[in-house]
Image: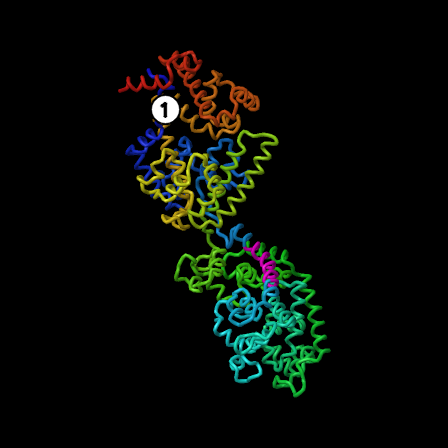
């Protein structure tokens, strides 16, 4: 009779061929095909367990086939929250149950308006936008004096856009040819281009520069007062939150512009001046501009609506005009308005900060379930303390360098309802990458409801990879080494989570060695054993085509790795591969595990020792401590047989048992294939001796090192006999 070790070698030395042979068996092939084709159709635990072929297949794949009958028990396992250490699956001493539960996502991926990474990236960009605002002002003030012609000014998109933003004009749709006519108009000529437009905003823009009609300049393009006006206007236009700096900019702008106002209509055409008056005289956004216009013209109306102070601060007649020789305000009136503004604005400053704004955003976005929720004003939510903070959509637009005042709420809705993957969608029709980036920061479906974030790797799979990576990095470690390794692993996990939320193509992933190494190590693969070219060939393989590169590799873990990503055949992120209760990678891992368990069971029909040896070879790299062996009946049998221990040792105190295991096995040796093989040789020899096979002496000779015949020779001889 052939020894157990030689029988084991005949399988282990040609493991891939052995697995392929099992996978091609009619029953195995048929059951695997059924599982692959149908697992994506179930959405609930009851549906899954109601399909016996699916359920029993999965149970066997995870070594739980002896518990297939216990449906109530297994339902509790599958419904466990694995993030809760006290959940049912996590409370069981046998880790196979938690592993089984982790392979399925019956709770579904979390639907959310923004993932943590999306939210944090947006808020980081929002806070950085204030630094960008200061940078843009510095650039404008440092470079505007070097401009000598209107063409030179318009060719500098950074300077031009700064000025357009300051005056509330579109940086995308205001043409340079149009601006050239505005900026070179003669303001004193009623028939000039800018005066014929009938829009005071363009008049204010032209007045801020000193271009001649031919586009040239005489000396400085802008005086210090003009630069101050534009930089103040920019600060006001780009601000979404009250600050001391913005308040000062408001004062500067008001002081500079109020002297140019000659009618109520002209004043009302300037949003910044109107906003200044709203703050100074306590008007909310709900009160229309017509209140201000009417109060400025009529003392009776002003008194009736409680705005007599506003009326008395200006000198307009009932037609909204000024009498000859009058100005919109005297210096005293301007001082009174400014004082009122400063007093009220300081209240806004005291109640607002970027920290308050981001805290409010974080709180509110967590409860957003639709675009409707997202567009609810702070004034209309349940929190009375956030009314003076910027709106959610204002912060989001600013984060992507979009002026919130340039986009209406209805336009925001249309953008968020658009599919950024559809070249004909509304957001793509805008032909502006800022709006596409803004849209991709949120997870809304075409009905306006929140959906699962589309990532290159789904969040639940990222969680799995993070857990595997950390386990592999801290296994066997103690004390300071464990602390250092844990901290390092946590850093890598944070990086992986953040970056995977931004990856959109397979090529982007493969270009980041840090991400690639993380994913490989999480699967127990050595990054040094695979080249970039090989990885590219793997990720370009069709997992459904058995003849493709990745499916022909000896190690199935590479196919499982590729299946863990939501990339289509072109390497682009896609919702198609994500699956329902199982991702593609989990499906492949289940099928691979089923085939491996079938192989072990088939071998066990002939020789239980071979099954146990194969099982130990598979599980050894995952064993972290003695309790992993004690909690697994098959591993415990392997251990007691290997060291010729009585089964009665299981009656000892469990800590004593663990101490005994550690005395016999150095856990670190289980990561060394050669030392694992040494243990298997010892096990098979002791197994043969205990079970009275006819080759015990040869096996023991190999074990003790006294034999002159190698294991390879024994295997060759056995193969000759069998042929």
Q: Quadrant of the C terminus?
A: top left
State which quadrant residue 348 falls in.
bottom right
The verdict on residue 601 being magenta is no
* Rendered image coloring scheme: rainbow
Q: Residue at x 31, y 17 (%)?
A: 717
Q: Is residue 490 left or right of residue 546?
A: right
Front-most of 82 and 159?
159
Q: Residue at x 44, y 18 (%)?
A: 682
State which quadrant residue 598 falls in.
top left
Q: How many marks?
A: 1
Q: Position of residue 343 (x, y in %)?
A: 71, 68
Front-most of 153 and 203?
153
Q: Position of residue 122 (x, y in %)?
A: 54, 55
Inspect this view and state whether residue 303 appears. Answer: no
Q: What residue does disc 1 label?
A: 604
Inspect this view and state whether residue 79 appears. Answer: yes
Image: 488 above or below 1: below
Q: Quadrant of the N terminus?
A: top left
Residue lying at the far right of the rendered structure: 332
Magenta-drawn stretch, dominant element (helix, strand or loop): helix
Q: Which residues are magenta?
A: 122-138
The verdict on residue 129 being magenta is yes
Residue lying at the far bottom of the rendered structure: 324
Q: Is residue 709 left or right of residue 94?
A: left
């Amino acid at each position: 009779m052939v020894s157990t070790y030689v029988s084991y070698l005949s399988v282990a030395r040609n493991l891939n061929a052995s697995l392929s042979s099992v996978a091609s068996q009619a029953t195995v092939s048929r059951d695997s095909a059924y599982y692959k084709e149908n697992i994506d159709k179930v959405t609930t635990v009851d549906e899954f367990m109601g399909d016996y072929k699916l359920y029993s297949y999965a149970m066997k794949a995870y070594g739980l086939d002896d518990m297939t009958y216990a449906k109530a028990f297994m339902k509790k396992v599958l419904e466990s929250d694995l993030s809760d250490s006290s959940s049912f699956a996590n409370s069981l001493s046998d880790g196979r149950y938690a592993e089984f539960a982790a392979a399925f996502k019956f709770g579904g991926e979390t639907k959310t308006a923004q993932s943590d990474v999306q939210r944090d990236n947006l808020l980081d960009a929002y806070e950085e936008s204030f630094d960008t605002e200061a940078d843009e002002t510095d650039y404008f003030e440092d470079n505007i004096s070097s401009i000598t012609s209107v063409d030179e000014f318009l060719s500098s998109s950074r300077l031009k856009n700064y000025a357009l933003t300051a005056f509330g004009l579109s940086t995308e749709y205001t043409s340079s040819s149009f601006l050239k006519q505005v900026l070179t108009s003669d303001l004193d000529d009623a028939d000039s281009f800018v005066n014929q437009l009938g829009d005071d905003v363009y008049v204010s823009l032209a007045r801020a520069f000193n271009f001649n009609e031919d586009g040239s300049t005489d000396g400085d393009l802008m005086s210090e007062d003009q630069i101050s006006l534009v930089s103040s206007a920019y600060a006001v236009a780009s601000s979404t939150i009250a600050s001391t700096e913005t308040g000062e900019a408001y004062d500067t702008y008001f002081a500079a512009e109020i002297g140019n106002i000659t009618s109520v209509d002209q004043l009302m055409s300037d949003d910044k001046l109107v906003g200044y008056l709203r703050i100074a005289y306590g008007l909310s956004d709900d009160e229309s501009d017509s209140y201000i216009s009417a109060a400025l013209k009529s003392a009776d109306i002003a008194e009736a609506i409680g705005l007599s102070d506003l009326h008395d601060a200006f000198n307009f007649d009932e037609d909204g005009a000024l009498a000859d020789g009058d100005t919109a305000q005297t210096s005293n009136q301007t001082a009174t308005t400014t004082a009122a503004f400063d007093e009220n604005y300081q209240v806004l400053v005291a109640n607002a900060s970027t920290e308050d704004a981001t805290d409010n955003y974080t709180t509110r976005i967590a409860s957003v379930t639709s675009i409707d929720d997202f567009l609810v004003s702070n004034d209309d939510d349940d929190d009375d303390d956030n009314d003076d903070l910027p709106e959610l959509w204002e912060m989001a637009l600013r984060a992507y360098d979009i002026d919130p005042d340039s986009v209406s709420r209805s336009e925001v809705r249309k953008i968020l309802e658009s599919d950024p993957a559809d070249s004909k969608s509304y957001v793509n029709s805008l032909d502006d990458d800022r709006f596409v980036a803004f849209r991709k920061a949120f997870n809304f479906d075409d009905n306006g409801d929140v959906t699962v974030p589309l990532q290159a790797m789904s969040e639940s799979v990222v969680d799995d990879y993070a857990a595997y990576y950390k386990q592999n990095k801290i296994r066997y470690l103690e004390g300071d080494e464990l602390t250092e390794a844990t901290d390092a692993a946590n850093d890598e996990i944070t990086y992986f989570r953040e970056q995977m939320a931004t990856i959109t193509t397979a090529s982007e992933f493969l270009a980041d060695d840090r991400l690639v190494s993380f994913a490989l190590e999480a699967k127990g693969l050595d990054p040094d054993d695979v080249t970039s070219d090989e990885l590219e060939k793997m990720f370009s393989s069709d997992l459904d085509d058995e003849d493709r590169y990745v499916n022909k590799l000896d190690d199935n873990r590479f196919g499982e790795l590729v299946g863990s990503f939501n990339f289509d055949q072109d390497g682009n992120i896609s919702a198609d591969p994500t699956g329902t209760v199982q991702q593609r990678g989990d499906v492949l891992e289940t099928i691979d595990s089923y085939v491996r368990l079938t192989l072990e069971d088939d071998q066990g029909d002939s020789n239980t020792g071979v099954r146990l040896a194969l099982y130990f070879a598979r599980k050894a790299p995952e064993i972290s401590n003695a309790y992993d062996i004690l909690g697994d009946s098959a591993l415990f049998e392997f251990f007691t047989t290997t060291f010729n221990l009585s089964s009665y040792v299981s009656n000892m105190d469990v800590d004593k048992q663990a101490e005994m295991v550690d005395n016999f096995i150095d856990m670190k040796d289980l990561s060394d294939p050669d030392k694992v093989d040494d243990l298997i040789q010892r096990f098979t020899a002791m197994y043969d001796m205990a079970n009275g096979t006819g080759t015990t002496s040869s096996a023991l000779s190999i074990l003790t090192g006294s034999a002159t015949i190698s294991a390879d020779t024994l295997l060759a001889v056995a193969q000759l006999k069998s042929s």
